[in-house]
Image (cartoon, rainbow, N blue to C red):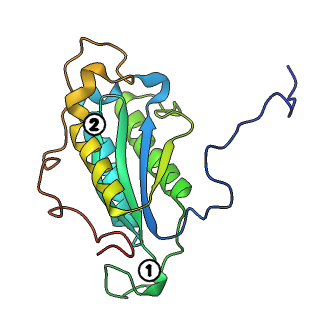
């Protein structure tokens, strides 16, 4: 079969004309390839969590808010800060990085986590994640708090979750501080938030 652009095209679910590198909070969901429950294996779940935290450590303009690694997907809130306006969380000891947009951050996370997952599984070059990801631009603090609650409670609803390939599986392990009081493990509030 030959390529026909009228039939073979991918529609972007991203907002046109929106700058995904601008400061703000974004809720993302990434799903394993074929919804395979890879992260029932604690070693692979730990790799995903380490790679997720690596985003914050690697990119000075990124803070991570609430997140949870489920058996076959990850929910998380990524906060992009405008470090060009002095919003850096570190002392200016190095040249400022270019602000990576959300898609490039998610791509970096997928690359790092997939390499490590495949090294453990002995399956080099096999995708661990679906090709795309879900994102939602968080508009205000009230919406952020609703999303935080959704992420915290997500493991409690795994048995009914449409991402669960088998209804009878044991529930996921949430990260240890997922139920901590708000503000105990988060970065700065949204730009413009009180």
The residues bearing labels 2 and 1 have C-alpha atoms spaced at a distance of 31 Å
x, y percent for residue 149? 24, 46
x, y percent for residue 107? 52, 50
Q: Is residue 38 left or right of residue 20?
A: left
- Quadrant in which residue 167 is drawn: top left
Determine which of the numbered discs, if any, sits on residue 45 in the image. 2
- Quadrant in which residue 73 is drawn: top left
Circle 1 residue: 83
Mark 2 / mark 1, whichever is N-terminal: 2
> Looking at the picture, does residue 53 appear above or below residue 37?
below
Q: Secondary structure at mark 2?
A: helix
> Looking at the picture, does residue 18 appear above or below residue 166?
below
- Quadrant in which residue 88 is drawn: bottom left
Visible residue check, residue 192: yes
**Which callout, 2 or 1, points to the residue nearer the camera?**
1
Q: Quadrant of the C terminus?
A: bottom left
Residue at far front of view: 142
x, y percent for residue 156? 19, 30
């Amino acid at each position: 079969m030959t390529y026909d652009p009228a039939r073979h095209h991918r529609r972007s679910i991203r907002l046109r004309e929106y700058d995904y590198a601008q400061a703000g909070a974004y809720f993302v969901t990434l799903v394993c390839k074929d919804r395979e429950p890879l992260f029932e294996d604690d070693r692979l779940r730990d790799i995903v969590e380490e790679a997720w935290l690596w985003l914050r450590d690697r990119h000075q303009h990124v803070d991570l808010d609430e997140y949870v690694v489920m058996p076959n997907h990850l929910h998380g809130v990524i906060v992009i800060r405008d470090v060009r306006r002095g919003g850096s969380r570190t002392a200016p000891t190095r040249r400022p990085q270019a602000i990576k947009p959300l898609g490039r951050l998610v791509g970096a996370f997928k690359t790092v986590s997939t390499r490590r997952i495949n090294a453990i599984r002995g399956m080099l070059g096999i995708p661990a994640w679906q090709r795309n990801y879900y994102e939602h631009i968080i508009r205000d603090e009230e919406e952020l708090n609703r999303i935080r609650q959704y992420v915290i409670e997500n493991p409690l609803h795994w048995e009914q979750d449409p991402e669960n390939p088998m209804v009878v599986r044991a529930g996921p392990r949430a990260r240890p501080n997922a139920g901590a009081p708000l503000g105990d493990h988060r970065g700065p509030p949204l730009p413009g938030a009180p």
